[in-house]
């Protein structure tokens, strides 16, 4: 091999990518996922606190509304209507493929 070939080979060797370090790649991926989890949790804090504040502020009104609606809710017709709606919703979810657990091919 001539001196020119050796110089070219050394230049090309300098351009080779470094060897992959699985521990480093895993650490970077873990850090990115932890950051994403932190951002997801932080994005859920405001709606949760806001919803809790709205429920707390409307508790007296909801209490009065529940007291007025309670005699109607315990009727057999209301219970049958709720049972029918729940059954219809479950059947719709099952037929449309949303309930993957109950399908034989899942």
Image (cartoon, rainbow, N blue to C red):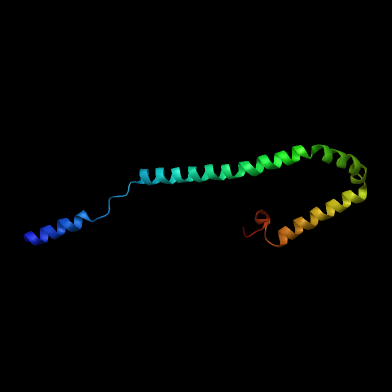
Question: Residue drawn 58% across and 45% down?
Answer: 43
Q: Quadrant of residue 41?
A: top right
Residue placed farthest to the left in the image?
A: 2
Q: Position of residue 84 (x, y in %)?
A: 84, 55
In depth, the one of 1 and 72 nearer the eye is: 72
Q: Quadrant of residue 105?
A: bottom right
Q: Is 59 on the left or on the right of 73, as rendered?
A: left
**Residue 37 spot, x, y in % from top left:** 53, 44
- Left or right: 62 with respect to 53? right
Q: Residue furthest front?
A: 57
Number of marks present in the image shown: 0
Picture residue at 89% right of the left edge, 50% below the top: 78
Q: Say which residue appears at 19% left-offset and 58% top-offset.
A: 12
Give the answer, above or below, for where 25 lies relative to 105: above
Task: Judge left or right: residue 27 versus residue 46.
Answer: left
Q: Which quadrant: the C terminus?
A: bottom right
Residue 71 image offset from top left, x and y in percent:
93, 42
- Quarter of the image for the N terminus: give it: bottom left
Q: Kindly indicate the quadrant of the structure image that contains residue 13.
A: bottom left
Q: Which residue occupies the foreground of this view, 63 or 100?
A: 63
């Amino acid at each position: 091999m001539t001196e020119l070939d050796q110089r070219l080979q050394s230049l090309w060797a300098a351009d080779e990518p470094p060897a992959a370090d699985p521990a480093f790649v895993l650490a970077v991926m873990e850090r990115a996922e932890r950051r994403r989890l932190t951002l997801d949790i932080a994005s859920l804090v405001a709606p949760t606190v806001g919803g809790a504040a709205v429920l707390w502020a409307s508790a007296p009104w909801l209490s009065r509304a529940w007291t007025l609606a309670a005699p109607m809710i315990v009727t057999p017709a209301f219970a049958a209507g709720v049972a029918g709606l729940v059954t219809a919703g479950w059947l719709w979810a099952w037929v449309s493929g949303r309930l993957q657990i109950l399908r034989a091919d899942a």
